[in-house]
Image (cartoon, rainbow, N blue to C red):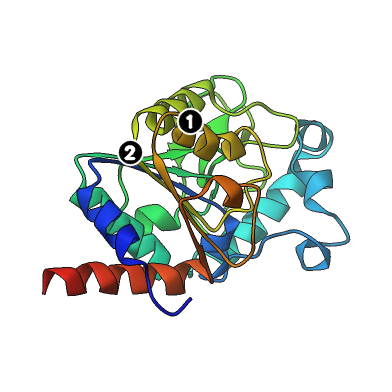
Amino acid sequence: MSNIPKSLIEAIRQAERVTVLTGAGVSAESGVPTFRGKEGLWKKYSPQELATPQAFAQDPRLVWEWYDWRRGLIAPLKPNAAHKFIATLEERYPHFLLITQNIDGLHQKAGSKKLVELHGNIWKVRCTKEGTVEEDKRVPLPQIPPLCSRCGALLRPHVVWFGEPLPTDALHQAMEAAENCDLFLVVGTSAVVYPAASLPQIAQSHGAQVVEINPEETPITPIAHWSLRGKAGEICQRLAQALQDTHS
């Protein structure tokens, strides 16, 4: 698709309540590995073997070594055009929420503030005894596994592991934003992981127009009012330019 539909630009300009859902496709363009398939293996372990409460209970050092390695890969990476475009949307609308499935913190680096992280954040740690959450951006971590400075208990990555439910507050905020928006953008996600995948459907059923930005068709495609095929960064850059051209 070489041109952005004028009807979409008009919809973005007229929208008052905007919700955005992002997935791994946005992070991949900044160089964040997907950790799926063979490229996701680390010391012969797959994410499904390490990102679980059981793995952490059995060998917290091993799990933390993997997360410390991942943090080292992500630390130097920079937001791409998709992150930046989404951050500008937040400035544009008083009623805005970004819902991300990504844990890398790149949306915050781009300037996003009104966001919900459904799967947590790799730069935060949580005390396994007190449940307190703190930011820790040290790379590499000076001690593995890290311990709570207050009580000495094990810290764990503040992320959602396989077999764990999504944070109730985050999910509630996401659902509420989906129900109350008039424009819902789905960017760089395959829309197969629930409950996140249900959010565009909820938005559409409540009258919102749905925009999909993804290289391939997804289960969201049939309900999307506009489906833009391509990488998130490239499409978002063209969207930003088209919006700017309409004001010039």
Q: Where on the picture, by quarter, is residue 216? A: bottom right
Q: Position of residue 142 (x, y in %)?
A: 57, 53
Which residue is the extreme one toward the left?
248
Q: Position of residue 93 (x, y in %)?
A: 21, 45
The residue lying at 54 percent from left, 36 percent from top is 201
The residue labelled by disc 1 is 205
The C terminus lies in which quarter of the figure?
Answer: bottom left
Give the mark count: 2
Q: Residue 238 vs residue 234: left or right?
A: left
- Circles 2 and 1: CB distance less than 8 Å? no
Disc marking residue 168: none
Element type where label 2 sits in the image: loop
Kind of residue at badge 1: Ser
Between 120 and 19, the one lying in front of the other is 19
Q: Position of residue 123 (x, y in %)?
A: 50, 48
Q: CA distance from mark 2 to mark 1?
A: 11 Å
> Alpha-carbon neighbours of circle 1 within 10 Å: few (<14), some, or many (≥20)?
few
Disc marking residue 182: 2
Which residue is the extreme one toward the front?
7
Kind of residue at badge 2: Asp
